[in-house]
Amino acid sequence: MSQNAFDRIVQEQNDAEALREHAKFEREAYTFRNYYIRPDMVAALRRYVEHRIEPGSFLMAVLSNDFMEAAGRADEENAANLPAFAAYVYNEMPGSCHGSLERVIKWLNATT
């Protein structure tokens, strides 16, 4: 087997594992008291932390600690569950990646 063929097989295995991990994240919700974050939003928050992928405007407002803006940008379900987003960000995310728009932008622009 040539090195290129071997490299392709390894890459395909890595891609398959990454897809399995992504699918697992897509199924996991977060709960806080009587509030929750649905799985797709948890996955977006994890992509932001782990891969520095910019989320949508609602999550950007949450991460920037601008809950008035977040309330205005949220869909009905997320608006009803804003306390869960505050709890998740505070309890589950590194402090250096949230709290102000400046911190969020710095996190997104950092090269690990």
Image (cartoon, helix red, strand yellow):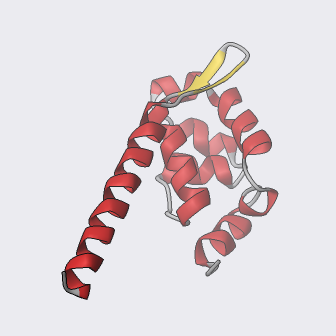
Q: In the picture provided, is 99 more to the left or to the right than 78?
A: right
- On the image, the x and y values in percent for residue 97 come to 71, 61
How many marks overall?
Answer: 0
* Quarter assignment of residue 108: bottom right
Residue at image point 61% right, 45% down: 69
Which sits in the foreground, 58 or 15? 15
Q: In the picture provided, is 29 more to the left or to the right than 23?
A: right
Which sits in the foreground, 65 or 22? 22
* Quarter assignment of residue 105: bottom right
* Quarter assignment of residue 33: top right
Is residue 105 depicted above or below 5 in this figure? Answer: above
- On the image, the x and y values in percent for residue 13 come to 32, 60
- Quadrant (top left, top right, bottom left, bottom right) of the N terminus: bottom left
Residue at image point 61% right, 81% down: 111
Residue at image point 24% right, 75% down: 8
Which sits in the foreground, 25 or 53? 25
The answer to whether residue 73 is seen in the rendering is no
- On the image, the x and y values in percent for residue 38 come to 50, 28
**Residue found farthest to the front:** 1
The answer to whether residue 1 is seen in the rendering is yes
- Quadrant (top left, top right, bottom left, bottom right) of the C terminus: bottom right
Residue at image point 75% right, 34% down: 87
Is residue 9 depicted above or below 65 in this figure? Answer: below
Q: In the picture provided, is 22 more to the left or to the right than 30?
A: left
Q: In the picture provided, is 103 more to the left or to the right than 41?
A: right
